[in-house]
Amino acid sequence: MPTNFDNKVYEVTSKIPAGRVSTYAEIAGVLGNRAYRAIGTSLSRNPDAPEVPCHRVVKSNGEVGGFMGSKTNNRDKVELLLSEGIHIKDGKIVNFEKVLYKFVD
DNA sequence: CTAATGACATTTG
DNA sequence: ACAAATGCCATTA
């Protein structure tokens, strides 16, 4: 069962619009701390996949990261991002800074 | 309660 | 600039 922290992570992550991506550090900043580590762990639980677009959350350097790891589904995440309009090059986002969504709204 | 882990990030070699 | 080591925060054992 998700904890309070997890709930915040899912909430912020679900706020990411389509065609945009965010980083663990950005989300951590919105939460008020730098717990990008715990955020990744919480997203790994991902109780609501379609509600929480965890695939739209990438690393700070623009890399997609390791969502599925060595599983074959790893490709699915990239495919989904491409569908959203995000271009990926060798596992990294091309126009990363342009698709990077900031919660400054 | 203490120790170890992890979808990361930053600093040092 | 690239590779390796250390640090961070919350969760889980």
Image (cartoon, coloured by chain):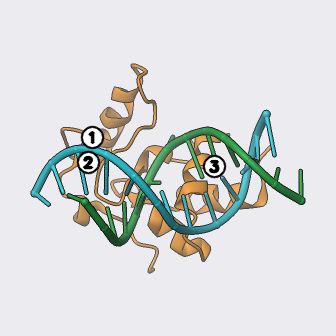
Chain colours: A orange, B green, C cyan
Mark 3: few/some/many CA within 10 Å (<14, 14-19, 20+): some
> Could you tell whether A89 is left or right of A19 in the image?
left
Q: Position of residue A100 (x, y in %)?
A: 32, 63
Nearest to the eye among marks 1 and 3: give it: 3
Chain letter of the residue carrying label 1: A
Mark whose residue sits in front, 2 or 3? 3
Which residue is pictured at 24% across the width and 59% down the height?
A: A96
Residue A45 located left or right of residue B2: left
Residue A39 in percent (x, y) is at 58, 55
Q: Which residue is mark 3?
A: A42
**Residue A63 versus residue C2: which sits nearer the camera?**
C2
Discs 2 and 3 share one subunit: yes
For the point 45% across and 68% down, which residue is it?
A: A26
Residue at image x 67%, y 63%? A8
Observer able to see residue A31: yes
Residue at the far top in the pictured view: A72
Tag on residue A85? 2
